């Protein structure tokens, strides 16, 4: 990394040296300016006067003052080109940071399965307290369909000129909390009126009744959406879209066997973001 920065600095210094040479080659010459009155010889200047024969031999001839030499015009002061300000942003990306929050409606379809070991014990799906059957060595199944509110807030970063952006969000929905990391491909060339669409991909980890900070689920997501700016400075905007995610939970161990969940979730949201 150090060698890379040294090479970059050397390249910048070389470019600046070339600019200096270009500026010096355009300096004024040392010739006097033709239209400068001070550079013109005085009027009615004839040949030098001759000594009169009647003039006494001891009298020195009158000297004629020479024409004053015009000094060359001073060079114009050296001026460097004014450089543009560095782009706003971090890591030389030139973009802007984002703060966002949203509220949405989530439709959950959870597939539950329990591989029982036998023993005849009653098996329940605890979130709904739904009876699934008895542990007799078979695989018991249950389907949980639910609708819930979902709240999200997070931080992000967007590349310049309505470029791609990423988010790191915290989401809360009933007994489940998630961390979502997503990357959105912004499509300004496909804008409709003032709406700029985007396509989003990402991944998430969930925390549901887990011990400590250990994650209990892992998933992937895909979504589409759009945003509209609310002011000319493009610092405030509204966002809306729909996401689909598929999440698999870690097995839940019971005396009668392991219980597994697979979630298919559709999420419709409306939010706002501040870009700075």
Image (cartoon, rainbow, N blue to C red):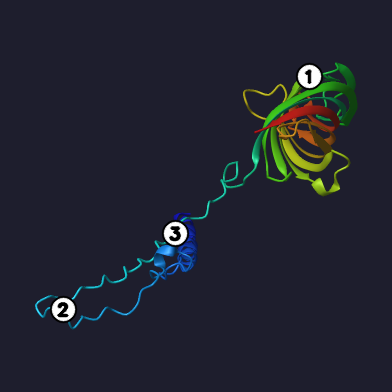
Check contact, mark 2 vs mark 3: CB within 8 A. Answer: no
- The residue most toward the top is 129
The answer to whether residue 9 shows anywhere in this view is yes
What is the distance, in whole Å, between disc 2 and disc 1 at their CAs?
A: 126 Å
Task: Choose top left, top right, bottom left or bottom right for residue 270.
Answer: top right
The answer to whether residue 120 shows anywhere in this view is no
Q: Is residue 64 above or below residue 215?
A: below
Task: Choose top left, top right, bottom left or bottom right for residue 271.
Answer: top right
In terms of sequence position, does the residue under pointer 1 or pointer 3 come before the other? Answer: 3
In terms of sequence position, does the residue under pointer 2 or pointer 3 come before the other? Answer: 2
- The residue most toward the left is 58
Which of labels 1 and 3 is toward the front?
3
Residue 275 x, y percent position in the rendering: 68, 33
| Location of mark 3 (residue) | 76
Mark 3 Cα-neighbour bin, 10 Å: few <14, some 14–19, many ≥20 = few
The quarter in which the C terminus is drawn is: top right
Residue 63 x, y percent position in the rendering: 21, 73
Instruction: Work out whether residue 253 or residue 190 is closer to the camera in this orientation and state it.
Output: 190
What is the distance, in whole Å, between disc 1 and disc 3 at their CAs?
A: 74 Å
Residue 250 x, y percent position in the rendering: 73, 32
Residue visible at 90% across and 25% down in the picture: 145
Mark 1 Cα-neighbour bin, 10 Å: few <14, some 14–19, many ≥20 = few
| Location of mark 2 (residue) | 55
- Helix, strand or loop for disc 1: loop
Residue visible at 26% across and 70% down in the picture: 65
Q: How many marks?
A: 3
């Amino acid at each position: 990394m150090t060698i890379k920065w040294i090479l970059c600095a050397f390249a910048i210094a070389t470019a600046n040296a070339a600019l200096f040479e270009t500026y010096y080659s355009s300096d004024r010459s040392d010739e006097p300016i033709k239209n400068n009155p001070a550079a013109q010889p005085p009027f009615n200047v004839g040949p030098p006067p001759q000594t009169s024969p009647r003039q006494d031999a001891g009298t020195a001839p009158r000297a004629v003052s020479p024409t004053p030499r015009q000094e060359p015009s001073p060079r114009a002061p050296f001026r460097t080109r004014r450089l543009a300000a560095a782009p706003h942003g971090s890591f030389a990306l030139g973009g802007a940071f984002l703060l966002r929050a949203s509220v949405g409606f989530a439709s959950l379809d959870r597939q539950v399965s329990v591989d029982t070991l036998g023993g005849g014990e009653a098996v329940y799906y605890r979130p709904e307290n739904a009876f699934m059957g008895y542990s007799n060595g078979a695989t018991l199944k249950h389907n949980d369909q639910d609708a819930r509110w979902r709240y999200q807030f997070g931080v992000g970063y967007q590349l310049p000129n309505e470029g791609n952006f990423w988010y790191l969000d915290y989401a809360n929905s009933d007994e489940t909390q998630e961390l979502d990391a997503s990357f959105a491909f912004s499509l300004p060339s496909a804008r409709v009126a003032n709406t700029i669409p985007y396509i989003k991909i990402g991944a998430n980890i969930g925390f549901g009744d887990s011990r400590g900070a250990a994650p209990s689920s892992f998933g992937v997501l895909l979504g589409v959406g759009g945003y509209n700016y609310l002011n000319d400075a493009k610092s405030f905007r509204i966002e809306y879209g729909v996401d689909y995610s598929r999440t698999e939970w870690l097995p839940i161990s019971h005396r009668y066997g392991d219980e597994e969940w697979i979630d298919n979730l559709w999420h419709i949201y409306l939010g706002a973001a501040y870009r700075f």
